[in-house]
Image (tube, helix red, strand yellow):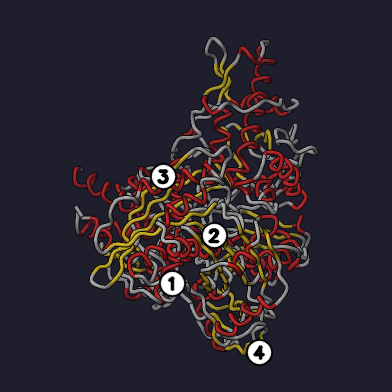
Amino acid sequence: MSRAGKITRRTLLVGSIAIAGGVAFGVWKVRQPVANPLSPPDGVALNPFLIINGDGVTLVSGRAEMGQGAQTTLAAMLAEELDLDWDSVRVIHGPAADAYYNAALLEAGLPLAEYGMRDWQHSVAGAMGQLGKLFGLQITGGSTATRDGYARLRHAGASAREALKAAAAERLGTTPSALRTEGGAVVTADGRRIPYGDLAEAAAQRTPPQVEPRDPSQWKLLGRSLPRPDMQAKATGTAIYGVDIRLPGMKFASPRMSPRLGGTMVSFDPAAAMALPGVEQVLDLGDGVAVVATNSWAAMRGAEAVEIEWGPAPYPPTTEAIFERIEAAFDGRRNSRMRNDGNAARTLDNAAQVIEAEYRLPFLAHSTMEPMNATALYTDDALELWSPNQTPMVQARAAASAVGLRAEQVTVHTPFLGGGFGRRLEADFSVLAARVAREMPGTPVQVVWSREEDMTHDFYRPGIIARMRGAVANGQAQAFEARIAGPSVMHQAGRRMMGLPLAGPDKGHVEGAFDQPYRIPNYRVEGYLADLDIPVGFWRSVGNSHNGFVHECFIDEMALAAGRDPLEFRLDLIRPESAVAYRVLEAVGEMSGWGAPKEPGTGRGVAFTWSFGTPVAEVVEVRDENGRIRITRAWIACDMGRALDPSIVQAQMESGLIYGLSAAVMGEITFADGEVQERNFPDYDALRMHNTPVIETRILENQPRLGGAGEPSTPPSMPALANALYDLTGTRARELPLNRHFDFIL
Amino acid sequence: MDLTVNDQTHTLDLPADMPLLWVLRDVLNLTGTKFGCGVAACGACTVLIDGEAARACQVALADVWGPVTTIEGLGTPEAPAALQAAWIRHQVAQCGYCQAGQIMQAAALLAENPAPSDAEIDEGMAGNLCRCGTYSRIRAAIHDAASQMREA
């Protein structure tokens, strides 16, 4: 483990040794301060985000690093206010604790379109966001890390800085205003330096000063592209991911659970597995087995070798029958009607020309590069977990209840995540590790899944059917109606993660369709929930991933029916609703040379989605190369208010687009005999270097509020590609993946 | 059985068909080489064997035909190799999980072709999957490292 990792571990293991002044302060706008979970043995934790000891300052992130760069930008928020040298910044992941609750995510739960929220609504939302403290929702997800941290961490950093200055002033018999801070030290007017480490004990005794963070015009770190603190380790093979945890005496185990998700195990025969070298035990988990071995290879081979008879799946056994069940949702009760401007039904009934279309989108896997895994050490009254996860408190709660402990008896370490994309919000991998570890008290065990087990036991992006109707007249949109059917991620996840039976309108199910800044006089979006027990979950951009597609493909269909250019048509509809969105769309038109004649044999498509607080417009270009299609170029324009680290934002924009295009071109999870048929990358691949387009990104900063970065470029990528393919070929794809209809160069 | 990894020779008593990947990760604790798919479809486990890029998940211990170089042997945080330094300059990694494999594949590519074109890089790297989509920076870092190595 890295040195930083040891700090966390020691902190947690000796948690009973309280430090002087070990109270939380600088926690922004929380009336009853949450307890500071940090109590380092040889240093001072000025607040939940900061440990100062003789070696310097360590910044504690409440958010996981899964590639999105959040730990860099969160650290920069603290370092900016604390005047730390960026080269000296160390970042560790904090423990599972209330202090790291995600207020931004709760704010995003309000049933309002984000682009239209008034200031008073944001303030109400902020108050509701405090519920995050009650739920203990320490979540890395929803593209919220920087939005959530922006005020809290800068306040925490400013408060700590002033406390350190006050402690120095007292020691020197001067006033804080006579002192400044620089390079991790308080500096006097005559240039004497007192390192923070010498002042931390005294500073922690003081009532935390409440000061406003600095004006952005004074920033030295934020707003710039900083070298990521995790980069060196990741380029040299020294970064520690979940699967890299190595503990003395550790065993390796691999699970094999029912391929019929949620189904039972009727019987099993471990003989063939036990005969393999390295296999030590085959554990009966009731709903599957885990093979314990001396190495991962033996464990995985062993899991494969166990002969098992499985019970039936608790859902229809084939893709076709599953989609019949989704289709049946249209006949049931409507779950939501979150947009209902004008009278869409009457307009459509009376319209001279009605455009109708049905879209069908497949289930999708997350397919992170690092397969699911967790390492656990169970002793009779405690469980220690090393779990690459996006929800430490959910992991603790779920693992505890699986092995008969209380959540407080579980310690969660969060190493680097080899990709998250929403998959690691779930806790199934930690639960499995805990269950295996309980069978071998005192022995640490790493439970690592084979790629096949990972891909066939995901919480999938739901399959969706969308029925669309539109009316145009005189080149303008008159009516837009979307009816969207599929299983509900939120309803399932509420039960799974919080034990709460979530009911009522599911915003996530229709996000990306109901909340877009288009001024259409008759505009209706309805959600229908399918009763389906296939595990579904949060796939990068969640509901926007399917609704962005259907909304933006159908807007294209309407534009063409109206005889309009698809970009001009959108600009007309968006202009009266959002100047910020208009400028994003205008920018992508300019970047892509939309107005200029196309090269022969090329097609271009545009799409726009406002999600996770950030409007993103994309243009994709495709080219016919001797009858086969290449995705040649893509342009992205986005506006997240402030690009706190432009290099990271650009990386996230490209990343989200490639993730979306991969799914659009070739992503599909299918079922036969109740079992997922795609088992490994040859069946479920993604774009690679040679078939990824050349991408250009422009970051605008017109929006008054901060937006997210990790997800919002995914939704528009898929419809932009489908629209480009229509432009090139005249074929409108209403089903994904697109390789069913088009011959790509892959 | 003797196995030389990063200039160090180990005498091992292990099944002959154990894939090199798991010998490195679970026996020698060289965890920089990553497990992604187990079927040579993602390139996360790429190492050099006698200078040639190989998918360690598909090479049985008994079949290892020469000395092995892993990401840890290419360079260290204190003394990164030219490719690793270029990866850091270009801020390539996001989650980073595939990057050891990407770097080892790039090392083999540059050993064979010190000045690859974009198309040659694309072809050489086609077997390496990155779910974060860091491809444009990988390509830029390879060009940069190639020119540094030519000048050195």
Distance between the Cα atoms at labels 4 and 2?
Answer: 37 Å
Horizontal side of A428 relative to A734 (left or right) equals right
Residue topped by disc 2: A540
Distance Cα–Cα, label 3 vs label 1? 27 Å
User: Which disc number belongs to residue A587?
Assistant: 3
Q: Residue at x 68, y 65 (%)?
A: A493
Q: Residues within 10 Å of mark 4 (few under 14, many from 20)?
A: some
Choose mark 4 or mark 2, whichever is in front.
2
Residue position marked by numbered label 4 in the rendering:
A267
* Lower position in the chain sequence, tag 4 or tag 2: 4
Q: Are marks 2 and 3 in contact (CB under 8 Å)?
A: no
Q: Looking at the image, is mark 4 or mark 1 earlier in the sequence?
A: 4
User: What percent of the width, then of the height, locates residue A585?
Assistant: 45, 48
Label 3, label 4: how many angstroms apart (C-alpha)? 61 Å
The residue located at (67%, 67%) in the rendering is A431
Q: Which residue is labeled 1 in the image?
A: A733
- Checking the image for residue A661, the label placed there is none
Viewer-nearest residue: A8 or A735 = A735
**Mark toward the start of the polypeptide (2 vs 1):** 2
Amino acid at pointer 1: Ala
